[in-house]
Image (cartoon, rainbow, N blue to C red):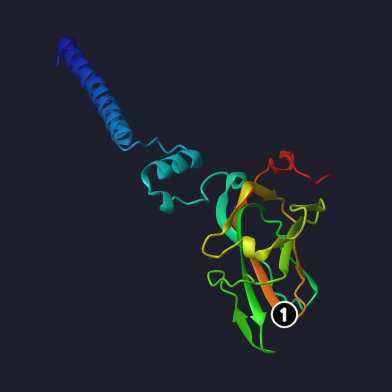
């Protein structure tokens, strides 16, 4: 093989390699564009991290199926509820129950409801149905108030009659969501002005648990 023929063959191989590289690059670019077009049609973004995954899930799943635990641990939020331990309150008596917010996360309270049982006769408890009203009311004489133990802040000027709030079928909505810090205690103070009735009340608080590294910067009555 003379030098001219060898040069031509080498040049041919070089050009073939360049064409193969260009073809591979164009194919990869084509696949990327097709994937991008597909994501755009589905209202998705490229999964480069947990935030992108969260966006894609929210854009493509029904609201009830979107998980609340995707993303940075300090932004995780999930539905939750606390209930107070039922306690007995006698005639002209008082009862203090509470919920304890664990260190795991804070609690955003949005709604609450109550359940009341009445002892009559002794040792027998009957559910006080808020939808069965009488002239005297559901639970005459039973009242309650809320208090944040850390700040000693109360949320009513006088205890509320339980007949007025917290129907389990229509939980009472807080005028503004209340944020309770981790390791805090929220108390319910019951008073019973009835001279004869014995009640066993309990309150359920509905809302969301929230992990937030910025929580201490939120406006709060807690000091120190």
Q: Nearer the viewer, residue 118 or 65?
A: 118
Q: Is any part of residue 160 visible from this angle?
A: yes
Residue 58 horizontal/vertical position (percent): 43, 43
Q: How many marks?
A: 1
Which residue is label 1 attached to?
198
Residue 55 in the image: state x and y as whole percent. 44, 40
On the image, the x and y values in percent for residue 204 come to: 62, 64
Percent from the top left, x then y, of residue 224?
A: 85, 45
Q: Residues within 10 Å of mark 1 (few under 14, many from 20)?
A: many
Toward the front, the furthest residue is 135
Horizontal arrangement in the rendering, residue 53 relative to residue 162 (left or right)? left
> Residue lying farthest top?
4
Q: Is residue 45 above or below residue 206?
A: above
For this rendering, which residue is in front, 220 or 133? Answer: 133
The relative height of residue 196 versus residue 101 in the rendered view (above or below) is below
Image quadrant in which you'd find residue 214: top right
**Residue 85 to residue 57: above or below:** below
Task: Indicate left or right for 39 with 168 as reference.
Answer: left
* Local SS, label 1: loop
| Residue 204 visible to an observer of this rendering | no
Q: Residue at x 40, y 35 (%)?
A: 46
Question: Which residue extends farthest right?
Answer: 224
Q: Residue at x 80, y 74 (%)?
A: 93
* Corner quadrant of residue 111: bottom right
Q: Nearer the viewer, residue 57 or 164?
A: 164
Which residue is outermost to the bottom? 122
Of 98 and 43, which appears nearest the observer? 98
Q: Residue 89 vs residue 38: left or right?
A: right
Position of residue 203 relative to residue 12, above or below, is below
Which image quarter: residue 128?
bottom right
What is the quadrant of the N terminus in the image?
top left
């Amino acid at each position: 093989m003379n030098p001219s023929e060898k040069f031509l063959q080498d040049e041919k191989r070089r050009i073939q390699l360049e064409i193969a590289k260009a073809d591979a690059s164009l194919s990869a670019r084509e696949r990327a564009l097709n994937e991008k077009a597909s994501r755009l049609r589905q209202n998705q973004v490229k999964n480069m991290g947990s935030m992108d995954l969260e966006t894609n899930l929210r854009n493509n799943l029904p609201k009830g199926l979107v998980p609340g635990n995707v993303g940075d641990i300090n932004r995780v939020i999930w539905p939750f509820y606390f209930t107070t331990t039922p306690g007995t309150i006698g005639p002209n008596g008082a009862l203090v129950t509470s919920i304890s917010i664990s260190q795991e996360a804070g609690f955003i309270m949005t709604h609450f409801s109550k359940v009341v049982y009445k002892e009559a006769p002794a040792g027998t408890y009957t559910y006080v149905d808020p939808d069965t009203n009488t002239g005297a009311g559901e639970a005459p004489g039973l009242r309650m108030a809320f208090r944040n133990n850390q700040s000693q802040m109360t949320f009513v000027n006088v205890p509320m009659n339980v007949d007025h709030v917290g129907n389990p079928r229509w939980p009472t909505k807080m005028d503004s969501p209340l944020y309770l810090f981790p390791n805090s205690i929220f108390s319910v103070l019951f008073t019973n002005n009835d001279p004869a009735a014995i009640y066993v009340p309990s309150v359920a608080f509905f809302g969301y648990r929230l992990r937030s590294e910025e929580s201490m910067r939120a406006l709060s009555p807690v000091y120190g």
